[in-house]
Image (tube, coloured by chain):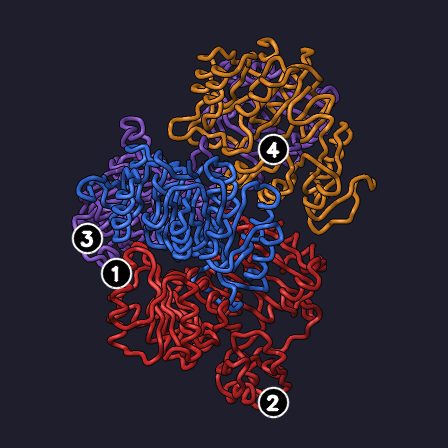
Chain colours: A purple, B red, C orange, D blue
Amino acid sequence: MKIHEYQAKQIFSHYGIPIPKGRVASSADEAKQIAEELGGKVVIKAQVLVGGRGKAGGIRLAKHPNEARDLAAQILSMEIKGLPVRKILIDEAANIETEIYLGITNDRSARKPVMMSSAAGGVEIEEVARLTPEKIIKVHIDPLLGLRDYQARDVAAGIDLPREHWKSFIAIAHGLWQAYLDSDATLAEINPLVITSDERLLALDGKMLIDDNALFRHTDFAEMRDLDTEAPLETEARKYGLSYIKLEGDIGCLVNGAGLAMTTMDIIKLNHGEPANFLDIGGGASAEKVTAALKIILRDENVKAILLNVFGGITRCDEVAHGIVSALNEIKPNIPMVTRLVGTNAEEGREILASAQMMTAQTLVEAAQKAVMAAKGGIA
Amino acid sequence: MKIHEYQAKQIFSHYGIPIPKGRVASSADEAKQIAEELGGKVVIKAQVLVGGRGKAGGIRLAKHPNEARDLAAQILSMEIKGLPVRKILIDEAANIETEIYLGITNDRSARKPVMMSSAAGGVEIEEVARLTPEKIIKVHIDPLLGLRDYQARDVAAGIDLPREHWKSFIAIAHGLWQAYLDSDATLAEINPLVITSDERLLALDGKMLIDDNALFRHTDFAEMRDLDTEAPLETEARKYGLSYIKLEGDIGCLVNGAGLAMTTMDIIKLNHGEPANFLDIGGGASAEKVTAALKIILRDENVKAILLNVFGGITRCDEVAHGIVSALNEIKPNIPMVTRLVGTNAEEGREILASAQMMTAQTLVEAAQKAVMAAKGGIA
Amino acid sequence: MSILIDRETRLIVQGITGNEGIFHTRQMMSYGTNVVAGVTPGKGGEWVLDGKIPVFDSMKIAVEATGANTSIIFVPARFATDAVFEAADADISLIVCITEGIPVQDMMRVRGYLDQKQSRLVGPNCPGLLSPGKSKVGIIPGNISIPGNIGVVSRSGTLTYEVLYALKLNHLGVSTCVGIGGDPINGTDFIDVLSMFEGDPHTEKIVMIGEIGGNDEERAAEYISSKMTKPVVSFIAGQTAPPGKRMGHAGAIIEGGSGSAKDKIHALEEVGVKVAHHPEEIPHLL
Amino acid sequence: MSILIDRETRLIVQGITGNEGIFHTRQMMSYGTNVVAGVTPGKGGEWVLDGKIPVFDSMKIAVEATGANTSIIFVPARFATDAVFEAADADISLIVCITEGIPVQDMMRVRGYLDQKQSRLVGPNCPGLLSPGKSKVGIIPGNISIPGNIGVVSRSGTLTYEVLYALKLNHLGVSTCVGIGGDPINGTDFIDVLSMFEGDPHTEKIVMIGEIGGNDEERAAEYISSKMTKPVVSFIAGQTAPPGKRMGHAGAIIEGGSGSAKDKIHALEEVGVKVAHHPEEIPHLL
C-alpha cells in the first residue's frame, strides 16, 4: 500500500528526520494561509500516488502567498496520470546545494532489508541503477540485529558525503531504519535528501510503501489508503476478499488460485484474446464468492465473454458447479460464459453445468479458445 | 544499581503490567491522605533496598486512614538492616488467591537472558531454587529475537497456571521483557505476581537491578541511585573513578587492578590480618588518584596500616613512586604504610620510596606480612 | 524414493483444532500420512479425530511425547511466525507453513533465525508437499497425482494441481511435489529443491513452475546450468501481467523493471531448459 | 608455537587515533607486532606513528587494503560493540576488545551474533594477548614475560602481570598468555582457551587464573577432568570478598549464593588441579 508524501514525511519527522516546515491543504485559500505562515517562498506539491508529478506540472515554486494561492488552485484542478489532485503539500522552499538518495527496501534475493544511497539524488533510483549502477552504495541489514552505526557510516563514506555531515546522516539513516521497521514498510525512501546552502540535511521528499500483509497491526495505515490509486472495482473486490485487477481486454476471468488465474490470462492471450481482468476467488468456491466475483466482472463494460476456470482439488467440482448455477440464477448474465471444471468429480460437475446450458471445456486451451471465440461474437 | 520497589512498579506499569493503585509518601500525613484517596484498606511498605522488610516490620496492613497514618509514622522512624526508611509506598490492599514468581535475569553461563517462574511466589527465588528447584520453570531468551509468545505460554503452562489467566500472563511476561530490555536491567522481577480473588493478575511487588555499565544511556536511572545503600566512602570513591568497597578489617589496601586488589586482600587474610577495604585505582597511578585513594582510606577510622601494592607494567614504577611521595607530602598520614612496587623500573621506584622513609617490600607475601605486623603495632 | 517427506514422516499439526487444521488433518490421514499429534495452545489434553490424535499445548511437549520430525502450520498469519519459531526451537527438521498473509519483515526475521538452525521451512503461503503413494504434508489433493520419477517444484497452488493432473492424464508419475509458496521471502527456494531432486536417485526429470516477481527463477537457471545433470522443464505464469500490480500472491509483482515472465523464460531457455507455453504442454516436453 | 597470535598476525587497531590507541600501538610495534593499519571513522587518509601506519574510515576498507586477520579495539564503551560487529562483518578472525564498561545486554547480543560467525572475540575488559617473543596484541607489558612452554589464561589484568612476572623470576617461559577479561559475558572463556592450549604442541603446562563470580571456573574444572591431558595449576582471587558486592570487575560478584572462591577452588581441587594460595606460589606448583 502506498501512502502520500506528506504522510511519509510526518512519519520520518517522528523518527527525528529533519523535514521542511510545511502543511497539507485541500484548497487554494488554505494554501495561501500556509504560505503566509511559512513567511515567503514555498513549494506546492500535488499529493498523488504516481511518479512524474514534477514533469506533469504538479510541483511548483511560489514566491509569495498570492502566487501560492493561484498555483494551488491550478494544481488542485489537475489530473496527473488519471489521478485527481485532492491534496497539496505546502513546504517552505529550501536552498539546495546537493541532492542525495537514501532508501531502505526488501532485497528478496538476500532475504534482508537493504539500505541504498547515491550521490545522484532527485532521480529515481531505478534510473540510477540502470545508467550508473556503480554510484549506488548498498548495505544489507541483518534483520535480527538492525542497522549498525558502522553501516550507516560506510554508506556516508561510500557516497563521498563530506565528513562534517556524517553525524546528521547517520542519525537520519537510523531514523529511516526505525521508521521502516516500525511501519512494516517494504520501501522507505528519502529522495532527495538535500544539503541546504546553510549546511543542513533535509528530507525534501519522502515515499513509503506499507506491507499489505502487516496492516492488521497498523490500523492507522489502513485508514490512509488512497482509493484514487485503484480502480473502484478493485476496492469493491477487496471487500469480498477477492483479489481482482482490472485490465484492458474483453474476456472476464474467474479462477481459483493466483498462479492459475495468471495462467488463464496467459492462455487467452496465447489464443489471440485479451483478458479483461485478473481474478482469484481463493480457496473453495462458494456460491457467495462466485456470485460476488461474477457481479464485479460484469460491471466492467468492456467484458464480452467470461471464462470461469476452477480446479477442483479438495473442493469437489460438483459442489462448485452447484455454486455456479446458483450464482447464475441470481445474476442472469446476458453475455456468453465458458466454464472449465477439472479435478475431483469434474465429470459430475460438467453434467450439472451442461443441464444449465453452459458452454463447457475440458482443457485449458479449449476453454481459452472457446472464450476468445465467444468474445468475438463467434458464439452467441 | 538497585532501584526501589515503587520505581520498579512504575516502570512495569508503563509496560502494561497491572500494579495496585498506590503512591509513595515520605510523611505520615501524606500516607493518611493517600489511604483516604484509595478508600480504605492499604498496605504500607518501607522503601529500603534490602531484603526481609516484612520480617523487620516494614510492611504493614492498615484498615483505615488513621491507622495508615500511625503505621506510616512507625515505619518511617525505623532502620532496617542499618538503612533508614525515608519513603513508604501506600498501596491499595489486594485479596490474594495465589502468589506466583516471575523474573528475568542474565544467565552468565548461557550468555542469554533467562525468564524464570514458579508457582511458589512470595518467597525469594534463591530459596525456591535451593529447596525445590523442580518448581522453577526457566526459558532462555534469544537476545537477538526477544521473548517469543510461545515461550511465555510454555512458562504459564509450566507453572500450571489456569488457562483463563494465560492471556494476561503472556502480556505481563512481554511487558516484563520489554521493561528489562529498555532499562538495561540485570534483573526484573515480580514477586509476588498474584491472582486476586476477583481473578485479576497483579504485580504486588517489583524489583529491578540496572546495569551500572549502561547508565550512560539511562541518565534518568542514574538520578534514582539511593545513596543510603552504599557506605558514604563508596559514593565518594565513585566520584574519583575509584572502585572502593568498605570492609570490616584494619589494613587499608590501595592496589592497581581489580584482580590484584582482591588478591592483596586474600594474602592479608592468609597472613592473619584483616583488610579494611577493596580499592582499585585502575590503570596508571597518577599522583591525583593516589592522593584521592589515600584520603578515602584514611577516613576509615578502623584503618591502622596501609598496604600500597602497585604492579608497574606500562606505567613505570619510578613514576608511580614519585606520585606516592607527592601524595604523602600532601596528606602526611600518621599511620604506617607498606609499599610494594613491582615490574618496570621497580628498583628505581623503591629507591625513591626508601629515601622518603617508606616501608617497602619485594614480594606480595612480604608486603602482606609487614602490613599485618604494622597494623598490630609491631612497627610504629 | 522421494525428498523431504516419506513413510518415515511423523507429523504434528500446529493449529489442529481450527477448521482448516481438522479438515486437512483428516485428508492427510486418509492419504496415509502418519499424523502423531496436534498442537493448539490452551487445548492440551484433548483428543481429536475420533479420539485418535492427542492435542498438546506446546511443540516441545508434543515432540517429546511423540518423536515427531515434521510439522505443518495452519494458524492465522499473526500467530504463524511464532509457530515457526516454536517448531524450530523444538528441533523439528521440516516445518511446512500453509498460512498466507505473513508480513514480509516477519519472514526476514524467521529466515535470519532459521539460517542458524537445522530446521528447514517450506512456505509460507504454499500448498505443502506430496510424495504420491507415500505421504502428504499439505493440502494438495492426493488423487490428482500418481507415484513416479518426476520431481515437481512450484511457487503456486492450483496451478501446481493442474500440472500434476496433466501429468497423471499422461500416465506420468511424481516422486515428490514441493509447493514453495507465493510469498516474496520463503523458507525454501527453487535451488534448494532442485539440489535435493538432483541428489534423489528416484527422481529423473524435474518440472519447475515459476511466476512473475523476484529473480528466483533466474538464479535457478544459473544453478541448473552449473550444477544439474537431470533435465528440467519449466512453465512461468504471468506473461500478461501488468507491471507494478501484485497478482494475488504477495511475491507475484513486476517492480523496478525486474521480475517479468519474459526475463525468466529467457534466462531458462538460455541454459537449455524447455519452457512450456501452457501447463498442458508440459507432459509432452518431458 | 603459540595460540591465537604469532608472527603471522596482521593487526588493525580500531580507535588508533585516541590516546590509548596510539600509545599501545607504539608499544605493540616496538614488541614486533605487525600492525598493518588503524581505523578511526572520519580520519581515513591520515597516517600516524611517524607516517608508518595508514588510518582508514572503516574496517572493510582497511581489511581489503591490508589483508589483516586480527583487530584490537580501543574505543569507548558506547561505541565498542559497534566496533566488534564491524570487525566481525569484515571477516576478522580474532577480535580483541580492551574496552571496559560495555553493557551486559550489548554483550549478549554480540555473543548471539558472533556465535553465527567465524570470528573469535577475546574480551572485552581484558588486557589482550601476549605470545612472548612473537607477538603482542593488547596491553600486557612485553618485558615481564619470556618465551616458553607454559600457557596462561586469566580473567584479570595486573594480577596476570604478577603471575607472568613471578614465572619470569623463576626462569619459566610462556607460550601464550590470554586475558579473557573480567566481564560477566565475554567472547572467549576458560574452556575455549584450555582446549586451544591442549591442542598446541608447544604448550606443556597451563596456569589458569580465576576470580569470584559466575561459574566459568567450575565448568573449566569439568572440562579439565574430562578432556585435558596437560597439567593445570590455578589461582582464584577473591577469597575474602564479601557476597553481593561487585569487586571492581563487572563479573566479579558473588550473587544468589554462587560464584564464591571457595566453590571454585573446591571444584578445581576435586579434579586434581593444584590451586595456589597466592600468585607467588604458582611457579613452585608447576
For residue D153, side relative to residue B139 (left or right)? left
**Residue at which label 3 appears:** A66
| Image x and y of residue C241, in percent | 47, 25
Q: Residue at x 65, y 39 (%)?
A: C74
Q: Which element is circle 3 on?
A: helix
Q: Mark 2 lies on which chain?
A: B
Residue toward you, D40 or B281: B281
**Residue at which label 1 appears:** B348
Q: Which element is circle 4 on?
A: loop
Q: Mark 4 lies on which chain?
A: A
Q: Which element is circle 2 on?
A: helix
Image quarter of the C terminus of chain C: top right
Look at label 4 and name its amino acid: Gly
**How far separated are the C-alphas under marks 1 and 4?**
88 Å
Q: In this view, does D66 lie above or below B61?
A: above
Q: In this view, does A364 lie above or below A38?
A: above
For residue C233, side relative to residue D145 (left or right)? right
**How far separated are the C-alphas under marks 4 and 3?**
54 Å
Q: Nearer the viewer, mark 2 or mark 4?
A: 2
**Residue at which label 4 appears:** A282
**How far separated are the C-alphas under marks 1 and 3?**
85 Å
**Residue at which label 2 appears:** B67
- Asked whether the residues under marks 1 and 3 belong to the same chain, the reply is no
Look at label 1 and name its amino acid: Glu
